[in-house]
Every structure is written in structure tokens, then in C-alpha cells.
Amino acid sequence: MTPLEYLRCSPETINPAIVTARHIQHLELSGQVTPEMMEQLAKEAKSAIAQCKQAIADYNYSLQRLKSANSQSNCVPWGF
């Protein structure tokens, strides 16, 4: 798959940590957070953070591949 094809097929997503934080804030502001919910909310937050760390690692890998590719005008690095 070429880099352009890869980018076209990649899903557009919002950082899961932001989504989780907004959800918890909404629950808190609307008075829906209970002590019983805290353990589950903590698990959701930890999961979102893990997903974000993996996304950052993937991004850094792709960035390093781009930096190490030979620059040629109008050419996409092979295998990227």
C-alpha cells in the first residue's frame, strides 16, 4: 500500500483520552458520578491513555520513516 493509499484508508478519529475526559466531565457536571462508578471510569481512562500511547508510538514511527526517506520531487517513498 502506498503512503497516499494508507492515508486515504486511515480513519479519522478523535483522541480517545479527550473523548473519555469529556464524558467524565459531563457526568460530573450533571451530578451523575457516584462512588460506585469511579472504578469503571478509572478503567476507561486507563484504556484511553493506553490507546493514545500506541497512537503516539505509531505516529513517531511514521515520522521517522518519512525523515529517513530520500527526498524526490513528486515521488512517494516506497513502502510507506
Image (tube, rainbow, N blue to C red):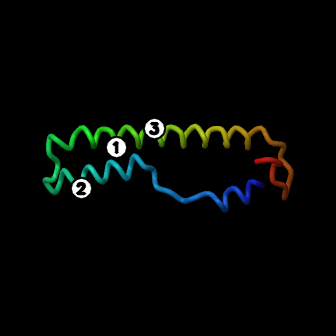
Q: Earlier in the sequence, mark 2 or mark 1?
A: 2
Identified by mark 3, the residue type is Ala
Q: Locate the N terminus and report the quarter of the image it occupies.
A: bottom right
Pointers 3 and 1 in contact (C-beta within 8 Å): no
* 12 left or right of 79 in image: left
Residue drawn 57% across the image and 59% down it:
11
Question: Is disc 2 in contact with disc 3, using a CB cutoff of under 8 Å?
Answer: no
Label 2 sits on a secondary structure element that is: helix
Residue 66, compared with residue 31, is above or below; it is above
- List the residue tagged with mark 2: 26
Q: Residue at x 84, y 43 (%)?
A: 70
The x, y position of residue 12, in whole percent, is 54, 59
Callout 1 crowding tier (Cα within 10 Å): few <14, some 14–19, many ≥20: some
Q: Which mark is residue 44?
A: 1
Residue underneath mark 3: 50
Q: CA distance from mark 2 to mark 3?
A: 22 Å
Task: Name the residue type under label 2.
Answer: His
Secondary structure under the numbered disc 1 in the rendered image: helix
**Would you call the spot at circle 3 few (<14 residues within 10 Å), some (14-19), or many (20 or more)?**
some
Q: At label 1, which amino acid type do we have?
A: Glu
Estimate the x, y position of residue 30 in percent, counting from the top left.
16, 57
* Distance CA(mark 2)–CA(mark 1): 15 Å
In the picture shown, does residue 10 fall above or below 65?
below
Q: Name the residue: 66% across, 38% down.
A: 61
Marks 3 and 1 sit apart, C-alpha to C-alpha, by 10 Å
Mark in front: 2 vs 1? 1
Q: Give the SS element for disc 3.
A: helix
Q: Nearer the viewer, mark 2 or mark 3?
A: 3
